[in-house]
Image (cartoon, rainbow, N blue to C red):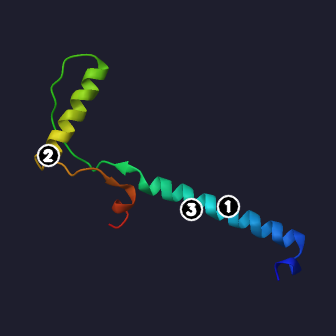
């Protein structure tokens, strides 16, 4: 049955299916990324940039642990509203 489809149409169908699969994969990868909800917390740190980043990360997880901030979620969960 597939052999009755002209070559040009078969090629177009293959390209359309490939583009659809790639777009769906890209959207799925984007939707699955972990994002942090908006949250405010205070961190005091004196040191280099790496030490400050580490202190900010530690402060965020302490805020999550104490219930002041929500933990990270997959991006698609925010699309539900």
**Cα distance, mark 1 to mark 3?**
9 Å
Per the image, label 2 sits on a secondary structure element best described as helix
State the residue in front, 46 or 4. Answer: 4
50 over 40 or under it: above or below = above
Residue at numbered disc 3: 24
Residue 5 x/y as whole percent: 86, 78
Residue 45 occupies quadrant: top left
Which residue is located at x 28 percent, y 16 percent? 48
Per the image, label 1 sits on a secondary structure element best described as helix
State the residue in front, 39 or 52. Answer: 52
44 over 12 or under it: above or below = above
- Earlier sequence position, callout 3 versus callout 2: 3
- Earlier sequence position, callout 1 versus callout 3: 1
Q: Name the quarter where the C terminus is drawn.
A: bottom left
Residue at numbered disc 2: 65
Q: Name the quarter where the N terminus is drawn.
A: bottom right
Few, some or many residues within 10 Å of mark 3 (<14, 14–19, 20+): few
Few, some or many residues within 10 Å of mark 2 (<14, 14–19, 20+): few
Residue 77 occupies quadrant: bottom left
Residue at numbered disc 1: 19
Few, some or many residues within 10 Å of mark 1 (<14, 14–19, 20+): few
Residue 53 x/y as whole percent: 28, 28
Residue 4 x/y as whole percent: 88, 81
Q: Residue furthest left?
A: 66
């Amino acid at each position: 049955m597939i052999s009755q489809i002209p070559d040009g149409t078969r090629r177009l169908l293959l390209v359309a299916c490939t583009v659809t699969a790639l777009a769906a994969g890209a959207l799925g990868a984007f939707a699955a990324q972990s994002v942090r909800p908006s949250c405010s917390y205070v961190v005091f740190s004196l040191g280099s940039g790496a030490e400050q980043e580490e202190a900010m990360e530690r402060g965020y997880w302490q805020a999550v642990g104490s219930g002041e901030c929500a933990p990270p979620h997959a991006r698609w969960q925010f699309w539900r509203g």
